[in-house]
Each structure stands twice: as C-alpha cells, then as structure tokens.
Amino acid sequence: MMYEALFNYLEEKSGLSLDAEEKALIASKFKHKHFRRRQYMLQEGDVARYTGFIVKGAARMFSVDEKGNEHVVRFALENWWISDLESFYHLTPTRYHIEMMEDTDLLLITNQDMQELLDKSPAFDLTVKMQNKYTSAATQKRIHAAISMTAEERYHDLVKTYPQFIQRFPQNMIASYLGISPETLSRIRNHAKRR
Amino acid sequence: MMYEALFNYLEEKSGLSLDAEEKALIASKFKHKHFRRRQYMLQEGDVARYTGFIVKGAARMFSVDEKGNEHVVRFALENWWISDLESFYHLTPTRYHIEMMEDTDLLLITNQDMQELLDKSPAFDLTVKMQNKYTSAATQKRIHAAISMTAEERYHDLVKTYPQFIQRFPQNMIASYLGISPETLSRIRNHAKRR
DNA sequence: AAATGGTCTTGACTTATGTCAAGGCAATGT
DNA sequence: ACATTGCCTTGACATAAGTCAAGACCATTT
C-alpha cells in the first residue's frame, strides 16, 4: 500500500530497519492525497502547510515574474520531497506555485508532525540528515553550473545528471529550469544532433 | 576565548543553553587554527577532512575552469561554516579551493567528531537542523536569482541581502560570485550611481 | 472529423554581456 | 622613494542568448 514506498525510502536512506511500531507512528503523521495532472498543491500567496513525499508522479515548482513569465525552480519525482521550505518553516506566504505534471500520489505532513517525527523516529531523523547532505551538495553544484557554465554546457550536464527529467518534463519547462528560452534550448538540441 | 563565539552561536541558533559539561564536550571536538590572509584551507584535489567555523575573518570558496578562470561559489564570514560538504561527507577529492580573504580564526572539526556531537549534544544537533533550514531557503533563493534575474537585478539583490559582502570582498570576486565579468559589474555600479 | 490548444522549430533581428586592450590609481613590498 | 602588483574603469568590438513572429506537428476535446 501507499506507505510502503515511504518506508522503503526511509530504510534505504537511513540504513536502519523499521519495526511495526515505528511504521505505525510514521504512518499516523502522514496523510495520503491524490492529485490529478495540472492540479496545484501550492499557489503564490498561500502558506505551505505541508511538505509532500511523492509516492508516484511528478511535480514542478515555479515562480511567475512581473511580465508573467514562469521560472521553474525545481522538479520532483518519485521518492522526492516537495514544498517551499521557506514558507513551510516560517509560515510566510510563498512566492511559488507547485503543480503536478502527472497524476500524482503524495503523502503530506505538517511542520509540527515533522518535528515530532524527528524527535521520535531515529530512522526518520537520520534520513532527513542524510537527505540534507545530499541536497546541499546538489544545490551547490547547481549554483556552480548556473554561474560558470554556458547554456549548452548546463543542458548537457542536466542530461547526464537527471536523464529522467528529459523524459518526463516538456522541453519548454526544461528550458525554464536551465534559465534559458525554449528557442535557445531547441537550437542547442539540434546543434548537438548534427555532430 | 576562542570557543565563546561558537558557544554563543550555538545557544542563539538552538535557543538552548549550554552547561559546562556540554561546552567541554563541544570544545574537545574542535581544534583552533589561525590562517593568514591568502592562506588556503583547501585546494582542488584535496579531500576536505574538516569543516570550519569562522570565529573571526572571511573566506571564499571557488573553482578554476579549464581556461583558468575562477568562479566564486560562496563567501563566508564570522559565524558561518565553511567546507566543501560533498568532499567532507563522501571523502572524495574536491573541485574547489577555499582561501582566506583576511587573517582568520577557524574552529575545525572532522566528520566523525561532528557525527558524535550530533548524537551527544542536543544544542549542536538542533543548531545544525535550524541552520539547514535557513541554508536551504537561501540557496533556493540564489538559484532562483541565477536563472530568472538579469545581472543588474542580481547585483542589487546582493547589496540588499548581504551588504557585508560589498564591504569585505573585492569587486572582481563579487562579480565572479554573481556569475558576471568584472567589467560588467563596474558598468552596472556606475549606471546605478548616475540615477 | 473538425477544432482547439499546446509544443517545438526556424528565421530575422535586438540586446545583454563577454572579451580584449589600455590606462589610472592605490596599496604593498623592498 | 621607487617599483611592483592588484584592482577598477572605460572604449571598441564580438558573441551568446533573448524576442518576436510564423508555421508544423500532435494530442485532446467536442
């Protein structure tokens, strides 16, 4: 059932195994919600009451600037967390939207329940610690890419690092994620092919 | 003395107060090291054995590309942590350099000692958790800036967010941090003045 | 089956930013 | 005091990427 994906993820990331009691505790803190393709989990101005764990599906988080242009800040797939952490932790209105790109099953948890789990479930606590390490390394790499590589280099790097993204997100959103226009991405891909 | 800065930081971030025993435990895990201006804490190819806490001073972390150009990935000042976390956690050779921009006092800790402190010192554990929240929000903001703002907007945003950087780091490194050339930054600053 | 809307491509043109080169100024070392 | 070096500015030119517009191709809805 739905929670198995989360248990597997926790056991794998933490390296610890979960007994029935810990599983029950964890399951009691998350509630399951199904989203349809194009449905929003969060909209600009909302406060992010939940962080979501993706059991199945895909989502994107993006902002909209004054000119109405969208900027994709992150993508998320199975076994990823999705939320605006700034809003989630500080209870401030978010500047972002989170939209499902496919029919998606999420497990949702509030900040308060998350704090409780961090205290009471060693596997959960350790998983979050491991995940933070991984994420901080990855975001550092992305910042480095953004400031030091050309659009073409960033695209090839993305293809290598997250090939799933290319399969599951349309090209104009990939372009937005890379910080370039869809036209530029189209040309980059055609140049690459010719060689 | 040297460790007071760290204790103050931990008490403030965690909201917990440290008794003599916890202070002694923490102090036993860090060693103090003084660096002179221009001295390196880490060089490309090294493994980052330590993470540093800056008691006094300033540092930059940067990479060098094939053309020999430097790219500043981050700056750090008093009460900031500095390390290549990817190398530190995975014991892989780093692609970065960390150089002191001023005479700097650091408190250094190994990964193993850090794990032990996370287990044994509640204030340390809570501080790291709080810090992770703060950092993940800040890096998300920086990624958003890099992909969606012009060079000029990014500069003004930096001036507002980290005015200390402008005071303490030379302009060519600020430019590198923003992902633009020193010439472009010079022109941006002069345009701004005229208005 | 036709209509609609979204997605990608391509061409022509514009604009932001980079590159190269030279000179000035201030800090630093000898 | 002088030489050296690093840092910043400015101009001329080059280039990467953005913008606008049109058309092709699909998938989805009616």
Image: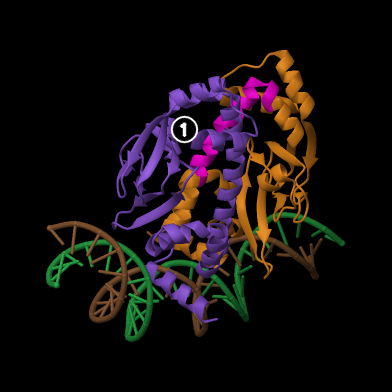
Chain colours: A orange, B purple, C brown, D green
Regarding residue A57, the answer to whether it shows in the image is: yes
The residue under the point 72% across, 50% down is A99
Compare residues B148 and B108 and report the one nearer the observer: B108
Relative image position of residue A90 (x, y in whole percent):
71, 45
Relative image position of residue B151 (x, y in whole percent):
50, 67
The residue under the point 52% across, 70% down is B152
Q: Chain of mark 1?
A: B
Q: Which residue is mark 1?
A: B3
Compare residues D17 and B109 and report the one nearer the observer: B109
The three-letter amino acid code for the residue at tag 1 is: Tyr
User: Magenta region, mostly helix, strand or loop?
Assistant: helix
Regarding residue A149, the answer to whether it shows in the image is: no
Whether residue B126 is in magenta: the answer is: no
Q: Is residue A64 left or right of residue A180?
A: right
Whether residue A123 is in magenta: the answer is: yes
Q: Residues within 10 Å of mark 1 (few under 14, many from 20)?
A: some
Q: Is residue B106 above or below residue B65?
A: above
The residue under the point 48% across, 44% down is A161
Compare residues D21 and B193 and report the one nearer the observer: B193
Q: Quadrant of the C terminus of chain B?
A: bottom right
Q: Is residue B107 above or below residue C25?
A: above
For the record, the magenta segment spans A118-139
The residue under the point 70% across, 56% down is A95
